[in-house]
Amino acid sequence: KAVVDTVLHRTESAPVGIWGASLGGAIALQSMQVDPRIAFGIVESTFDEFEKVAIEYGADLMLGIKSEWLTRHVIGKSGNIAQFDPQSVKPVVSAAAIDRPILFMHGDRDDKIPIEFNRRNFEAVPSAQKQWITVEGARHSDLWRRQGGRLRDSVQVFLHRMERAALPQ
């Protein structure tokens, strides 16, 4: 909220948006849920539930083996140490409470976060002003390298629409 306060203090007339990729995308969704002053969002390659993505990342560390038991154990211990409930990190729940425009994008060959995780976020958003872009052939970190021109054009159209919507009628 402090970041939004600062931005609004500097530019009262422009709409405030948020853009996040991967973990940042989850943070963007959660931020939009708690701060209605965020007028729109752009979300790249994120997850719907922390536990699910932790299992995916854990498999990378354990030679491809997905151990739900071990992941839950580690997450539980981490939550105790950090004094937070890891089960509360569910961007899909936040997405279901957002009624503002959001542009989602995800690579169909994401090797870290399955595209279905972010698709669940998209489907949960009740706003009719949501948009989904599948970036064909893109893994987790190369969306812009794969289809930068197309993404740039889509983002510009989206941002211009947000700007026009904020102008007095």
Image: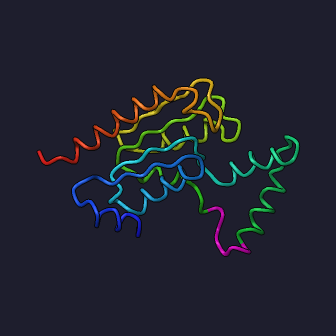
Task: Examine the rendered structure and indicate whether residue 138 appears above or below residue 16.
Answer: above
Residue at screen point 54% across, 33% down: 144
- The outermost residue toward the left is 169
Residue at image coords 49%, 57%: 30
Q: Nearer the viewer, residue 126 or 32?
A: 32
Q: Residue at x 37, y 51 (%)?
A: 17
In the displayed structure, does residue 141 sit left or right of residue 54?
Answer: left
Q: How is the image coloured?
A: rainbow
- Looking at the image, residue 105 lies above or below residue 97: above
Look at the image and tell me in which quarter the C terminus lies.
top left
Is residue 31 found left or right of 11 in the rendered image? right
Q: Position of residue 145 (x, y in %)?
A: 57, 30
Q: How many marks?
A: 0
Specify the segment rendered in magenta.
80-87
At 53% from the left and 28% from the top, the residue drawn is 134
Q: Is residue 152 left or right of residue 51?
A: left
Residue 77 on the magenta span: no
Q: Is residue 158 left or right of residue 74?
A: left
Question: Height in image: 74 above or below 45?
Answer: below
Which corner quadrant holds the N terminus?
bottom left
Residue 147 percent coordinates (x, y): 53, 26
- For the stretch drawn in magenta, the main secondary structure is helix
Q: Position of residue 104 (x, y in %)?
A: 47, 39
- Indicate whether residue 83 is drawn in magenta: yes
